[in-house]
Amino acid sequence: MLFGAGVLCASLYSTDIIHGSAYAAKAQAQYARPIAPLFARGSIFFSGKDGTESAAATLGSGYLLYMNPKQITDAAGAYEALSHFVTLDRASFMAKALKPGDPYEELESRLDAGPALSIQALGLKGIGVVPETWRSYPGGTLAAHELGVIGEDTSSSTVTGRYGLERSYNSVLSRIGVGSSVNAFAQMFAGWDAAFGGDDRSGDIVTTIEPTVQAYLEKILAQTETAWHPDEIGGVIMDPSTGEIYAMSSHPTFDPNDLKSVRSTSVLSDPLVEHVYEMGSIMKPLTMSAALDSGAVTASSTYEDTGCMTLDQKKICNYDHKARGLTTLQTILSQSLNMGAATIALRTGATVFPKYFTSFGLASRSGTDLPNEASPLLGNLKNPKDIDIATASYGQGIAVSPVGMARALSVIANGGYVVEPHLVKEIDRTDGTVQKISPQRMGPVLKPETIDEVKHMLVTVVDTALANGTIKRDHYTVAAKTGTAEIADHVNGGYYSDKYLHSFFGFFPAYSPRFIVFLYQVYPKGAQYASETLTKPFDDLTSFLINYYNIPPDR
């Protein structure tokens, strides 16, 4: 008897306290229109730099205007009365009102309380309003790909997450339908956990996305898109030590509040996670790291740069086809020399070199908490020929996702650890418990002296070579590298002669980094090299982050 009473109390608590508001709204609705489940779903929050939370995805509420054509006696009069409070198409209204035997037609949704209650006060026969709820994204396009969208699962007639965090955390955000409650006595036989709601692990999620940083990143991407008209552009701002993503965006984008205007569902996919690309010369710092760490070269090593070389009957060259003669390792990064990267990769060896790239996380998915992550394409390094090692050393012939590339490059920034990029830092359960998401990292995979040397080289790139040293900061060390990759022609084979992918990464303060920034764009028009198109966007983001987070100078 005590057990049965406990089950009843638990069921009453669930019905009245946890799901009470949903049942109350449904009770109001069922007398006005055909019974339908009232929409309910957990919220998604952004996190401000001061820890404040703001709504990223929540429930909107308002009223639905409907009519019962069977009860309409004066359709024209009803239309005239309603037109004072809501804009309706007269022809459509009259067509619905004159349907014989039709008991229910929706006229307008998502009405504010003012006009809805005014219409209710008219007391028009056959016209009514009922409360309704819907998914709302207050930021509009802000972080649209990352938040995702919901849709109806036709097989079960339930709402489910389709893209982004809405999909990957659907089991947390979903709510038990108020129309599908189970008899409390039946729950007793389902076990103690089910009886007391232990199987309901629903809740809200708190993201790592900082809304001001996200908005600024999207502003910079929009400006860059306007200037260079790429087919696609995106960026990631992340803490390289923890994998927490402060901002992440790509264009073209969409407004999840207005999916009717989306012309193709392809725009809903997140290319930062779901696409892979040959990234070009931003791979060279990782090549340098492998060569130094393995002992194949030292910081003082040199090589003879011939401008071009032929491997396995294939010719590869520097970007300008020019020879440099006796050349230092620093020059490989400062002038982005393909011959230098290929030479030190070949010295590292066909067995050792791929192992380093695997240890950096390039050969596996990043583990991000966004859905549909694409697998990297590193097949050329499984049984590599010399030409495969050489082209991989400068980012051709292998392909990774933007978020996977950001993770790999973080190894240099964070002391040699492979982190797991993530967007959710906390789950607030409906039962009152809070689940913190702990950062995941592996390693170290590089020696401290290797990291120090590569960091020094990348700082030198910014101070002396990038934009001819004009973006050097007197009070901050910034490490960065550009990348320009040829785009594969999947129709005719080979590569396009006039289409390039531009990429850029940097971290700062270089010797104790707070942020790593990764940018890319596919086929920008009017410029061949990434240094021409992405240097200023990176510099603008760096200035913003330093000022917004009040980062102290490090030199």
Image (cartoon, helix red, strand yellow):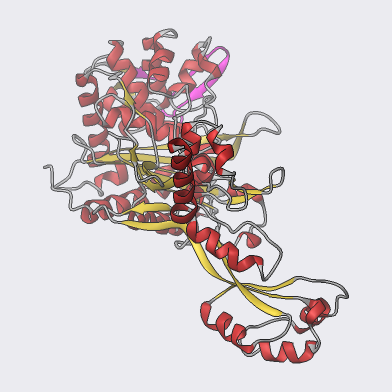
Res. 540 image quadrant: bottom left
Question: Which residue is at 44% across, 34% downward?
Answer: 368
- Residue 361, given in percent of the width and then of the height, sits at 41, 23
Residue ranking furthest to the right: 100
Name the residue nearer the viewer: 151 or 64.
64
Q: Which residues are magenta?
A: 304-322
Name the residue nearer the viewer: 272 or 553.
272
- Residue 474, given in percent of the width and then of the height, sits at 15, 48
- Residue 388, given in percent of the width and then of the height, sits at 51, 17
**Side (left or right) of 14 relative to 238:** right
Residue ranking furthest to the left: 555
**Does residue 141 appear in this view?**
no
- Residue 526, given in percent of the width and then of the height, sits at 51, 52
Question: From the viewer's perspective, is residue 297 above or below residue 87?
Answer: above
- Image quadrant holding the C terminus, namely top left
Name the residue nearer the viewer: 293 or 36.
36
Question: Which residue is at 43% across, 22% downward?
Answer: 393
Q: Is residue 305 magenta?
A: yes
Question: From the viewer's perspective, is residue 471 above or below residue 196?
Answer: below
Question: Which residue is at 39% across, 53% downward?
Answer: 45
Res. 259 image quadrant: bottom right
